């Protein structure tokens, strides 16, 4: 079973009461030995957390749980590929259940073009950024994470090429935001997409219409 937790602001991940109740024991197991669990973050994610709070805020972070016990955790797409996927394979082999895998032909580097049309009181824009797919898990980043006008896009692509992406980030200049929302405000939404061959397309219908065009490099 694959579950995702999203926070409007990374700082919220430090607050136990804001975690779903079923995941709080896993959070505590992580905190009890966070230095050991994050030893590989530098290699797989590009940074090594200095405190337990920083470790909790790194996103995306993956947790593998079996019988209520934390058996693996890693950060970033590198951590997913190097540590999480092999652990899932081992757990699946022992339990006799298939591991979560996406279509392998989609693995690789992709470009993303995000087009959002003009709206009343909000200017349109076109963004371009990169995305990486490993074992069907896709993760892209526009701008520097945690800064205004930045966001990430992530989701697990199914064998049929269908995925429900989650986009979360911080608003940029107010002229581009619905209702003139100020800069540096956390936001999140989901949108469906479908991949076929070396291309994909997604459409956002929440809030304002946006189109996402994916092309494999």
Image (spheres, rainbow, N blue to C red):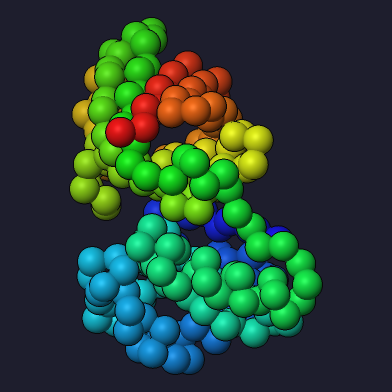
Q: Position of residue 160 (x, y in %)?
A: 65, 35
- Residue 53, compared with residue 147, is above or below; it is below
Count the marks: how many? 0
The residue at the point 44 percent across, 91 percent down is 33
Residue 32 visible from this viewpoint: yes
Q: Nearer the viewer, residue 42 or 210?
A: 42
Q: Nearer the viewer, residue 179 or 148?
A: 148
Q: Nearer the viewer, residue 90 or 141?
A: 90
The residue at the point 35 percent across, 88 percent down is 35
Q: Is residue 164 left or right of residue 73?
A: right
- Taking the view exactly as shown, the residue that stands out farthest to the right is 96
Q: Position of residue 207 (x, y in %)?
A: 50, 23
Snapshot quadrant of residue 149: top left
The residue at the point 44 percent across, 63 percent down is 80
The residue at the point 27 percent across, 19 percent down is 126
Q: Position of residue 97 (x, y in %)?
A: 76, 67
Snapshot quadrant of residue 95: bottom right
Q: Position of residue 215 (x, y in %)?
A: 37, 27
Give the quadrant of the N terminus. bottom right
Residue 169 visible from this viewpoint: no
- Residue 50, compared with residue 45, is above or below; it is below
Q: Nearer the viewer, residue 96 or 192?
A: 96
Q: Is residue 96 left or right of residue 138?
A: right
Snapshot quadrant of residue 82: bottom left
Give the quadrant of the C terminus. top left
């Amino acid at each position: 079973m694959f579950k995702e937790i999203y926070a409007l602001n990374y700082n919220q991940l430090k607050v136990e009461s804001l975690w779903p109740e079923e995941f709080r024991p896993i959070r505590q197991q992580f905190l009890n030995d966070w230095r050991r669990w994050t030893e590989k973050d530098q290699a797989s994610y590009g940074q090594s957390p200095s405190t337990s709070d920083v470790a909790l805020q790194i996103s995306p972070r993956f947790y593998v749980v079996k019988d209520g016990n934390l058996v693996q955790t890693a950060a970033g797409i590198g951590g997913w590929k190097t540590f999480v996927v092999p652990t899932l394979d081992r757990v699946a082999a022992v339990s006799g259940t298939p591991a979560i895998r996406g279509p392998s032909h989609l693995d690789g580097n992709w470009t993303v073009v995000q087009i959002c049309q003009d709206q009343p009181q909000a200017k349109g824009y076109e963004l371009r950024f990169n995305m990486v797919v490993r074992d069907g898990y896709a993760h892209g980043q526009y701008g520097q994470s945690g800064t205004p006008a930045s966001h990430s896009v992530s989701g697990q692509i199914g064998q049929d090429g269908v995925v429900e992406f989650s986009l979360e980030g911080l608003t940029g200049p107010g002229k581009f935001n619905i209702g003139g929302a100020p800069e540096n405000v956390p936001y999140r939404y989901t949108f469906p997409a479908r991949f076929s061959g070396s291309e994909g397309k997604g459409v956002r219908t929440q809030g304002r219409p946006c189109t996402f065009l994916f092309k494999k490099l």
